[in-house]
């Protein structure tokens, strides 16, 4: 279940991006399209949401978003470098102004001492060349981590 506060945040994002005439693309991995799905439930989202990509596997990141395989081998799929490359790939695929991407280890398995459960990256790239990447380590079960990643994505769009 999506918290009401997250739905309200999505409404704020749609309103803000609409006022700025900004169209976005999203590339999601660990959230499995949750952010794109949430945004597109908001009336008027068609004015701002251009396209979304769910690239869960490494091969889909490589084939669809053009993330270089050596980058994933060197840094891992859940990394600042790969998430930024995902966002750049999403931006290059469509006529949009901004692209947002995420990768995370939502659990309940897959974590390590180096990359703990809840490790998440959110990247935003803009057509003007601006890039931003944030790292988080969220606590909670799989569902909670995924919701927190979506919240971080939406907050990045507002700031």
Image: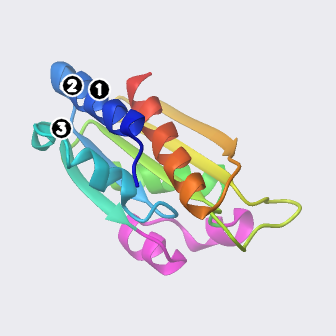
Residue at x 32% of width, y 31% of height: 8
Q: Is residue 95 magenta?
A: no
Q: Nearer the viewer, residue 115 or 92?
A: 115
Q: Is residue 17 left or right of residue 129?
A: left
Residue 43 position by quadrant: top left
Q: Is residue 112 left or right of residue 85?
A: right
Residue 2 marker: none
- Position of residue 54 relative to residue 14, above or below, is below
Q: Is residue 60 magenta?
A: yes
Q: Is residue 35 left or right of residue 40?
A: right
| Between discs 2 and 3, the one toward the N terminus | 2
Near mark 1 (Cα within 10 A), the count class, few <14, some 14-19 or many ≥20, is some
Q: Nearer the viewer, mark 1 or mark 3?
A: 1
Residue 15 marker: 2
| Between discs 1 and 3, the one toward the N terminus | 1
Image location (x, y in percent) of residue 83: 55, 53
Q: Name the element at disc 1.
A: helix
Q: Name the element at disc 3.
A: loop
Residue at x 42% of width, y 43% of height: 3
Image location (x, y in percent) of residue 127: 32, 35
Q: Which residue is mark 1?
A: 12
Q: Is residue 98 visible?
A: yes
Residue 48 marker: 3
Residue range highlighted in magenta: 55-76
Which quadrant of the rendered structure holds the C terminus? top left
């Amino acid at each position: 279940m999506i918290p009401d506060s997250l739905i309200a945040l999505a409404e704020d994002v749609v309103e803000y991006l609409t006022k700025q005439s900004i169209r976005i693309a999203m590339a999601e991995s660990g959230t499995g399209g949750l952010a794109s799905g949430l945004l597109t439930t908001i009336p008027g989202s068609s004015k701002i949401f251009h396209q979304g990509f769910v690239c869960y596997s490494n091969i889909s990141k490589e084939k669809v978003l053009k993330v270089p395989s050596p980058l994933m081998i060197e840094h891992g799929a859940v990394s600042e470098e790969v998430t930024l490359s995902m966002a750049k790939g999403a931006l290059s695929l469509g006529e949009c102004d901004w692209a947002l991407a995420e990768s995370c280890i939502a659990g309940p398995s897959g974590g390590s001492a180096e990359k703990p459960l809840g490790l998440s990256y959110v990247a935003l790239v803009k057509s003007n060349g601006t890039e931003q990447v944030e790292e988080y380590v969220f606590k909670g079960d799989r569902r909670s981590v995924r919701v927190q990643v979506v919240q971080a994505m939406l907050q990045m769009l507002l700031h």
